Image (cartoon, helix red, strand yellow):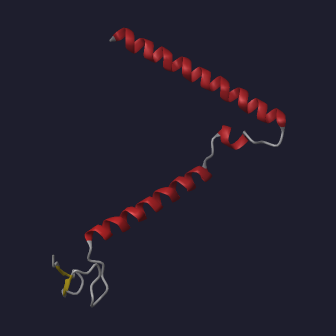
Amino acid sequence: MVRHIKCPNCGIYNTNADYCTNCNTLLSYKKRRELAFAQEEKKRRERERIQKEASPSFFEKHKDHRFLIVRIFVKITHSIWMAFMAIGMFIAWLITAIAA
């Protein structure tokens, strides 16, 4: 099937081409979407990397500390926090179940 696509940049009609033969502008909508998706994915990964580097959590920052006492303190604190959150979630679930 023959496709005639008009270049949005220079106005020349191209036949079955992804790029314009005159100005080399991308004509394929599929490739445009793929390129845009790849760029957005790259930006998302970069934002995640920067955010992770900029603000590591207390646990992440100290879990591999060089002093044993600090590592033990961090693990105990993290365990207490996880238990506290689990109990809180259970109480919230219980209240919701009773109300329903």
Outermost residue toward the front?
1
Compared with 92, 29 (above or below) is: below
Q: Quadrant of residue 36?
A: bottom left
**Residue drawn 67% across and 26% down?**
79
Name the spot of residue 47 as percent of width and height, x first. Answer: 51, 56
Q: Is residue 59 left or right of residue 11?
A: right
Q: Is residue 47 left or right of residue 54?
A: left
Name the spot of residue 41 as percent of width and height, x first. Answer: 44, 59
Outermost residue toward the top?
98
Quadrant into which the C terminus falls? top left
Quadrant into which the N terminus falls? bottom left
Compared with 71, 33 (above or below) is: below
Q: In this view, does 49 lie to the left or right of 78?
A: left
In this view, the residue in front, 80 or 33, is 33
Q: Quadrant of residue 12?
A: bottom left
Compared with 61, 78 (above or below) is: above
**Residue drawn 28% across and 67% down?**
30
Name the spot of residue 21 as percent of width and height, x first. Answer: 27, 89
